[in-house]
Image (tube, rainbow, N blue to C red):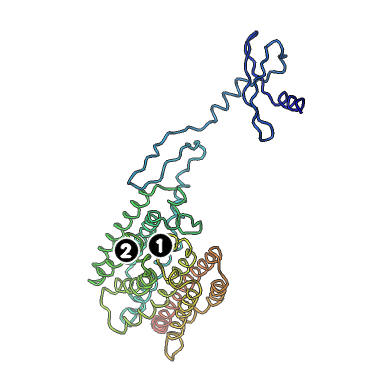
Amino acid sequence: MQNKDSALDKDDTTITVSSPKKKIVDSTATTKGKTANSSHIVTAESVQAEEVPTIPLSSLQTLSKLEPEVSVRSVAATQSVRLPAPLVVQPSEYRRSLGEWMQVWWEGVRPGYVLLAIMPVLIGSALAWQQTLSPQTHFGKFHILHFIAALAAVIALQIGANLVNDYYDYIKGIDTSNTLGPGGLIQQGLIRPINVLNMGLVLLALGALVGVVIALAGGPYIYLFGLVGLLCAFFYSATIYAFSSLAFGELAVFCIYGPLLTLGAFMIQVGGVVNRASLLTVLLYSLPLGLLATAVVHTNNMRDFESDVQANKRTLATFLGLRLSRLLYILLVLGAYAVILALGIPHGAPHFVLLTLWTLPILVVALTGILRADMSASLHVAMRTTLKLETYFALLLLVAILITGLLAILPLFIHLRFLHL
């Protein structure tokens, strides 16, 4: 047994050689998980020159150049919330170009959610153009500058709200471990939190400024609509009394992406003068948009159910549970189609709105996805499908409004053509 240990010691001992005729003591050696202290003393004459391992100096210099720069940071606790700088500085070849930074911001602003705000503006503006068709105005009236300004204001407010939402979700610890959550500029360490907040506030201010200018053309109610939209954009996720954390998120989404934006775009085009019949028509057309947008946000909350519970974020999904949340989703999407059937089926109604029924295959996919989903990944797919459903539904509704308006002026156009001949 003693001979065996002695052999192991000899095999695992690392010999360090110094100048001739000097004795050195060996360091600690490890054998199969067991640490053994060796005190075997050798002299330089007992070691052959070819047994001493050497490393070329040039290799050591190359390794030294490849080592990253290390910065020393304080680990003391601070009152301010900030993203810690990386300890290791990335080499220059890993630093993003301008195009890559633009791609990072583009993905962070959630372009899919921006469509939720654009569609009501398109529908409201198209309805306003349809209302102006008359024998006196053959092709109607459409204020293109007012339309572009309204669209710019809405896009700025929506993107600003998304960025502010990212910041306050990070502050509250929401979606920090959710890889499927939207945005993620801060959660993924791409942008500093304060930069995200500043950009969001700048865009909210820009949207509010443009909104004040176009409100001059839409009447005093546009100021009220703009103020409500601005407050909802900020307080949807900001402060401890955020709408999204008090189970009012779905209600706010329905009001903003349904009646408020649609009616606001309509009034900007017609100059603020709205009779009762026009008001009722616009409200009816806005309901499907609001219901489908609410379904998108509700599916998002269903997907984030677990992370919201951990962060004490109270949404309708956390209150109702998965089963009742599925039922609410079904009521929302089917309610949108019920409004379309009520608009398009009666005699003398604008039947072309039934073009939106072409989205029924997407609706079936969305419903089956919701009914079968029980994990975050599958609910994320269902949410994307619902967003796709809302986009195609709104586009087909827009086409239906335009076709209805063109058919209304077609006889007049043919009559003028014959007179010209």
Residue 421 seen from this side: no
Residue 161 seen from this side: yes
Q: Residue furthest front?
A: 1
Q: Please report contact status of discs 1 and 2: CB closer than 8 Å, yes or no.
A: no
Whichever of callouts 1 and 2 sits on the residue coming sooner in the sequence is 2
Q: Residue furthest bottom?
A: 347
Which quarter shows the C terminus? Answer: bottom left
- Between the residue at mark 1 and the residue at mark 2, the CA separation in whole angstroms equals 12 Å
Give the foreground label among 1 and 2: 1
> How many residues crowd mark 1 within 10 Å: few (<14), some (14–19), many (20+)?
some
Q: Residue 332: which disc?
A: none
Is the residue 348 above or below the residue 28 in the image?
below
Q: Quadrant of residue 241?
A: bottom left
The foreground one among 346 and 375 is 375
Residue type highlighted by circle 1: Asn
> Residue 318's x, y, as percent?
44, 68
**What residue did someone put label 2 on?**
241
**What residue did someone put label 1 on?**
312
Q: Quadrant of residue 229?
A: bottom left
The foreground one among 107 and 85 is 85
Which quarter shows the N terminus? Answer: top right
> Residue 142's x, y, as percent?
33, 71
Number of marks in picture: 2
Residue type highlighted by circle 2: Tyr
> Residue 201's x, y, as percent?
32, 55
> How many residues crowd mark 2 within 10 Å: few (<14), some (14–19), many (20+)?
few
> Residue 20's x, y, as percent?
65, 8
Which residue occupies 52% across, 38% down? 93
Q: Quadrant of residue 98?
A: top left
Is the residue 61 above or below the residue 242 in the image?
above
Secondary structure of the residue carrying numbered label 1 = loop
Secondary structure of the residue carrying numbered label 2 = loop
